[in-house]
Amino acid sequence: MAHGHDDGHHDGPPAGHHHHDHTDIDWAEMAALLESQAELFAPLYERAMAWLTDKQTEPGLIVDAGSGPGVVACLLAEAFPGARVVAVDGSEPLLERARARADRLGVGDRFDTITGELPGVLDELDYPADLLWASRSLHHLGDQRAALAAFADRLAPGGTLAILEGGLPARFLPRDIGIGRPGLQARLDVLEEEWFAEMRASLPGTVAEAEDWPALMTAAGLRPTGTRTFMLDLPAPARDRARAYVAASLTRLRDGFAEHLDATDRATLDRLLDPDDKASVHHRPDVFVLAAHTVHTAVHAM
C-alpha cells in the first residue's frame, strides 16, 4: 500500500474491516473520506509547506509519494507556483480525484500523476525531484530503510526529502465525557498501536526498524536538515466539518475494533455515534480536534 493518510497518529483500521484484515483496504471506497479529512487538516499542511519553502526556494519538480486523492499535492502546487508537481499513488481512482482537484484549483497545467507501487514506481519520473514529500506512505512499505534509499536516489543534487511520520494521537473529547468509563480515547490508542504493529508485521518483506527517521535518512546518504511538528487545533465547540471527521474516525475505530472493545466502551461509542442521542459527537459542546504531525527533512548533498 502506497498511500498517504492525514487523520491520526497511525492510519487505524478502515471502517468495516476487522482487526485482523490489515491489508484488505479499498482505498477507492475511502476516497471521499480521505479527501475531506485532508481538507480539514489543510491549515496544518499549509504551515508545513511554509516551512519547506525556506528549504527549497524554487524547486522545479515536486513529487508527492503516496499522494492519495491529491489534497496535499495541490497544496504543494500552490505553495510552489513555479514547480511541476507529480502525484504518485498505487490507486488510479484516487489519482483521478487528484487530477480533477488540480484542474478545479487551476494548477492542472503543471500537475501530473503516476500510478504504481512505491518505491519502484519512482523510476518512471522523467528527471530527479527537487522536493520529494512522503506523508505516512513510508510505513506501508515493508523495508523502510530500502525505501528511503530509493527515495534518496530520485532526488536531484541539493534536493530535499520531507517525510511525515509520527506525531501524537489525535484527541476529540475530554478524558471524562460523562458517559462510560473515563479515558476512552487512550484505550483506543492502545488498540491502534497493536493494529499498527500487526499491519507492519504483515507487509511483504517487512523489516523491523527503530523509527529514528533522521538516522535512517542519514543511512540513506542524506543530510538531515530539520524536524518540526505542526499542530491542528480546532477548539470546542467543533464546527460541522470537524464533527463529521470525529464521527467518521470513531466509526472506523468502533467497526474495526468491535471484537476487542469491552461492553462498556462499545456502548459508549454507540452513544457517541448516534445522531439522535444528545450525548453524541453530533451534538455535544465539548467536541474538538487536536492533532500533531511531525515532518523530518534531509537534503541530497551537492
Image (cartoon, rainbow, N blue to C red):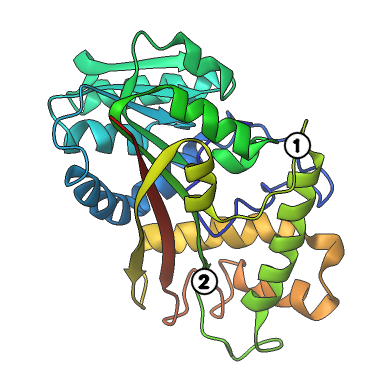
Q: Residue at x 34, y 76 (%)?
A: 235
Q: Depth check: 68 or 268 in front?
A: 68
Quadrant hosting residue 294: bottom left
- Residue 223, above or below 184: above
Crowding at dot 2, Cα within 10 Å, few <14 / some 14-19 / many 20+, comes out as: many
Q: Residue at x 49, y 12 (%)?
A: 123
In this rendering, position of residue 262 left or right of residue 164:
right
Badge 2 marks a residue whose secondary structure is loop
Of the numbered discs in the image, which one, if any, rests on residue 281?
2
Q: Residue at x 52, y 51 (%)?
A: 215
Residue 223 image position (x, y, % from top left): 38, 43
Quadrant hosting residue 116: top right
Camera sees residue 116: no
Residue 24 image position (x, y, % from top left): 75, 35
In this rendering, position of residue 217 left or right of residue 72:
right
Of the numbered discs in the image, which one, if any, rests on residue 23?
1
Q: Amino acid at mark 1?
A: Thr
Quadrant hosting residue 300: top left
